[in-house]
Image (cartoon, helix red, strand yellow):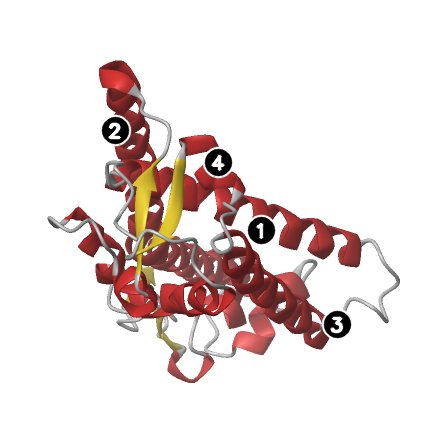
Amino acid sequence: MDEPALERARFSDRFLAYFADVFLIMAGFYATIFALAAAPPSAATPSIARLLLLLWSLLFIIYHAWFDSGGRRTLGKALLGIKVFSVEGEAPTFGQGLGRSFGYMLSGLPLNLGFFWALTGERRAWHDKLAGTIVLETRPKGRFGRIMSLCAAWGLGAVFTLAWLWTFIGAPRFAQMKLLASARIAVDSLARLEESHHKATGGYTPDVSVLLQGPGSEELLRELAQVLDPESLRIEVGAAAYAIEARALDERKTLIRLSGPRR
């Protein structure tokens, strides 16, 4: 049988359909996670959470395998008016649907290159080539509909890109900056304790345990352990001056040094 006289689906439609299907599965996954969080503590264990992730991942594979075969279509593809066919123009078998579903992992591994392969002339992703399928547009959109689909895909892509940049670049750097700032505050707190100790006794002390004897000392000790390398903490004192240095627990193990007395 020849390929149906339908145009091959555009990448923007495929992208939006895939997002809708992923969103459906992720909504179910997080619903079970929230339900688990409300359950007794004995049920909310890491092993149970990992099992749920595995089950929903398997459900994702079966969902696509079933609805992308036998003339059916997934919710996302139904919304976008596209459908999976075999390269011969027939309804894919369940085996083809299953191969195509597992092929998503192949397409996603090298920075999602396999998905972007659908931007080429054939408009077939790697999982299409693996399963011997094509995706066709069964509901023509017209010029306005195509522009709207393209804009929505670009907008969603931009959101994903920004989210990726924040997760893997921005957030780690922000966390490191926040940790370093907290480390400076912690060393400054020790310097203030030295000043207070000097006012009370007339001298400075190199002993951290002596400084951490007042109210709130346990909390400050916990803060110090979270942001400073305890083995690097040094306090040097003289008759009329002191110097405190320690390395923060950031990636560079930044050296922080304060000296006094303050003027």
> On the image, numbered disc 3 is attached to which residue?
45
Q: Which amino acid does label 2 sit on?
A: Leu
On the question of residue 226 being in view, the answer is yes
Q: Is mark 2 on a helix, strand or loop?
A: helix
Q: What residue type is labelled 4?
A: Ala
Q: Earlier in the sequence, mark 1 or mark 3?
A: 1
Q: Nearer the viewer, mark 4 or mark 3?
A: 4
- The reply to whether discs 4 and 3 touch (Cβ–Cβ < 8 Å) is no
- The reply to whether discs 2 and 1 touch (Cβ–Cβ < 8 Å) is no
Residue at 46 percent of width and 79 percent of height: 230
Q: Is mark 4 on a helix, strand or loop?
A: helix
Q: Residues within 10 Å of mark 2 (few under 14, many from 20)?
A: some
In the image, taking residue 146 as reference, residue 29 lies left or right, namely right
Q: How far apart are marks 1 and 4 (CA)?
A: 16 Å
Q: Nearer the viewer, mark 1 or mark 4?
A: 4
> On the image, numbered disc 1 is attached to which residue?
25
**Where is residue 74 shown, x and y percent of the image?**
51, 45
Residue 210: image quadrant is: bottom right
> On the image, numbered disc 2 is attached to which residue?
150
Q: Distance between the residues labelled 2 and 1?
A: 24 Å
Residue at 67 percent of width and 73 percent of height: 51
Residue 240: image quadrant is: bottom left
Q: Which of marks 3 and 2 is in front?
A: 2
Residue at 31 percent of width and 25 percent of height: 140
> On the image, numbered disc 4 is attached to which residue?
78
Q: What residue type is labelled 1?
A: Ile
- The reply to whether discs 4 and 2 touch (Cβ–Cβ < 8 Å) is no
Q: Earlier in the sequence, mark 3 or mark 2?
A: 3
Farthest top residue in view: 144
76 and 183: which is toward the camera:
76
